[in-house]
Amino acid sequence: MGITEALDQSRPGMVREVETAISQRQFNQRTQQTYLHWISRFVLFHDLKDPDELADEARQQFLAYLRDKIRLSRARMNQASQALTFFYEDVLNKPAPTDTVAA
């Protein structure tokens, strides 16, 4: 399974929803790839649950995992955080949880 296939496994059509939201914001291709990567890893981290079913703490758990276990650089943490903020606000149409972990 490709990493972006996880999105469609969690909710059919999710990849298309993300791509549509990215197109509306006119992000470049590299940003699209990066956002799809982090959003897919987020969904995989939470066992392919439908993102609408994930509580606000899910984002913080994922970012804490990236920081503490994976030990991502600050720049990569910011990428992941921005991708998830975009995902919540522009794809799921929910307010993004406050970010207390990424920094």
Image: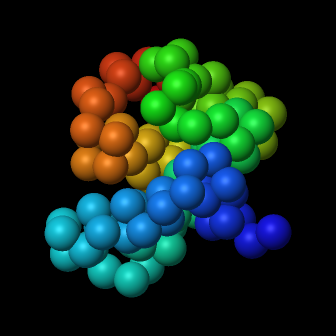
Which x, y percent locates residue 80? Answer: 50, 48
Which scheme is used to colour this image of the protein?
Answer: rainbow
Taking the spot 34% from the left edge, 41% from the top edge, the residue there is 92
- State left or right for residue 16 relative to residue 39: left
Is residue 65 among the parts visible in the rendering?
yes
- Name which quarter of the figure residue 47 lies in: top right
Taking the spot 75% from the left edge, 71% from the top edge, the residue there is 2
Up-down: is 70 above or below 19? above
Taking the spot 32% from the left edge, 49% from the top edge, the residue there is 91
Which x, y percent locates residue 49? Answer: 65, 36
- Name which quarter of the figure residue 6 lies in: bottom right
Up-down: is 19 above or below 47? below
Q: How many marks?
A: 0
- State left or right for residue 49 relative to residue 22: right
Is residue 102 among the parts visible in the rendering?
no
Farthest residue to the front: give it: 12
Taking the spot 25% from the left edge, 74% from the top edge, the residue there is 23
Name the quadrant of the N terminus. bottom right
Residue in the foreground of this view, choosing between 8 and 61: 8
Which x, y percent locates residue 66? Answer: 68, 38
Residue in the foreground of this view, choosing between 18 and 32: 18
